[in-house]
Image (cartoon, grey):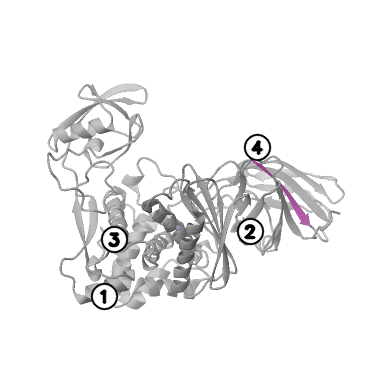
Amino acid sequence: MIPGYIWWPMRYRLSCPAPQTHHFHVALELDRPGAAAGSTEEAWLPIWTPGSYLVREFSRHLEGFEATDEAGRSVPVTRLDKHRLRLDAGAAARVTLRYRVYANELTVRTSHLDGTHGFVSPAGVFLAVRGREAEPHLVSVELPEGWQVATALPGGPAEFTARDYDELVDSPLELGTHEVARFEVRGVPHELAVWGRGNLDLARFAVDVQRIVEAQAAFWGGLPYRRYVFIVHLAGKGRGGLEHAASTVLLLPRLAFGDQEGWEDALGLVSHEFFHLWNVKRLRPAALTPYDYGREQYTRLLWWFEGATSYYEQLLLVRAGLLPPRRYLKALGQLLTGLLRTPGAGKLPVAEASLMAWVKHYRPDENTGNSAVSYYLKGELVALALDLELRRAGHALDEVTRQLQARHAGPGLPEDGVEAAVAERLGVEAARAFFDRFVRGTAPLEPALDVVGLRLRRRAAQGADDRGGSPGKPVEGPVPGWLGAELSAGPRLLVTSVREGGPAWNAGLTADDEIVAEGGWRVDKAGLAKRLEERGPSGAVRLTLFRRDELVEVAAPLAPAPEDTAWLEPVPEPTPAQQAAFEAWCGAPFPPR
Ligand SMILES: [Zn+2]
């Protein structure tokens, strides 16, 4: 008996004796009171993790299975399929299954272990036991000298309990010597645990994160947890977050915090994942209730759960004074620009983009923009459009959002739940017309910006890096011709995507083509931009390129650039009603500053 050992019917002992090899060692100890002779146990691992709709096949990283009974006798382990194992445990009163997990993928939904830290994404590390999922699960950790644990699970410093397997999967663990900041909101403790070096001023960051928590607590009317943990990873590349019920994991570029844009982007990610603790964790699609970790689950509502969350991510930052309204309007202009530049938005309804998340959003390729639309991007703009329609009728999306939570948290949001709540305010016909056009259909989205004293303007893009959101520079000199291809920024000039129906598309340019010359002369990205300017919209280019390993020539007649670049501006003579509506919407005075 180990001193201080607590008996527990299901316990994982997690260790990492050689973290530099990226292997977690797990021992799953299972108590089997009254087990019959010849009986078996089935252990299984999720193939996906909630919040990230891709089959990741976590089981491919598990190895070295060995099982023993309470007397140390070997228990046979047989693989049943890609993610299930059988243990022929017979009458054994207790079985211990040992295995290792290779953890070397640094994202918010996969596990990572090296000499500096460990991050446990539980779906890929802890095997469940069939029939025992509803029992409490205990996790004991044995760590290198000086390492600590940050997790939302109660317990510590080395033992943590989850009330069931769902809570375990929903509770990642950060292990290491992370920097920690703490604050309280409404008497509830919050913890920020940061791994990785960079230019983040943690004390200053914690102040702004606290303001986000306060703003969202005010929006929702309270905080529905006993403690919340932000796990922050700083790395050289990548950006993303994954939401959990009482924690979140955020991956941010380590040097992102030096300017206002980077700072606001990081706050946006915090705000987004935090909002999810209500919108997709406590309230989730009924179609994902309960979670089925063994197969894909389908809903048409991700446009709501991601889109509305993205909408409030920004809007609540504005209302909290963390994002100036003028910069918010710039961001909205960039979103509208993104939608205008997505031919797929005219083909795939956002409800279907949600349904197809598993094979489209999470598996993008060079044709994604032509065939699909992001339910984040369009979902956020649909939420804006819905909010403006509701405000025109004297309501607001705020009421709908809170009502859905109050009404459906627990059993889950029915597929028609958002429309039903909107219909209560706008009427059944108007609600159906809106959802038919913009959610189930692909009609061009035109948010009623006049309600809040704004209007949409459009122009052609000015160069490859023009993301819209501003009026652009005054146009002087020649108007460049338009090719309709996205090009890489690296030393090799690669085509990354081609806009359907544009000149490059019609000429047969394709992703991965490497452009080396135009008109017989070597070009780089800036050189090609210059040629497009010289030739103008009625000119043509003659491109020499490598397609795979073959040198080919492609002639492409150019075209005038489409007006696919949008920005928002205040209407010249706003009425008092428009000004009041803007202030109610953004919580800031009109005109936006
Ligand atoms: Zn999200």
Q: Is residue 42 magenta?
A: no
Instruction: Pinpoint residue 342: horizontal percent, then vertical percent.
Output: 30, 49
Disc number lying in front (2 or 3): 3
| Distance between the alpha carbons at the discs numbered 2 and 3 | 42 Å
Q: Is residue 574 above or below residue 382?
A: below
Q: Is residue 356 left or right of residue 496?
A: right
The structure residue drawn at horizontal position 28% and vertical position 70%, both measured from the top left corner, is 589
| Distance between the alpha carbons at the discs numbered 4 and 1 | 60 Å
Q: Is residue 592 above or below residue 550?
A: below
The answer to whether marks 4 and 1 mark residues whose Cβ atoms lie closer than 8 Å is: no
Q: Quadrant of the N terminus?
A: bottom right
Residue type of the residue flagged with mark 3: Arg
| Distance between the alpha carbons at the discs numbered 1 and 2 | 47 Å
Q: Is residue 341 above or below residue 410?
A: above
Residue type of the residue flagged with mark 2: Leu
| Distance between the alpha carbons at the discs numbered 3 and 4 | 49 Å
Nearer-N-terminus badge (1/2): 2
- Mark 4, Cα crowd under 10 Å, few <14 / some 14-19 / many 20+, is some
* Residue matched to label 1: 580
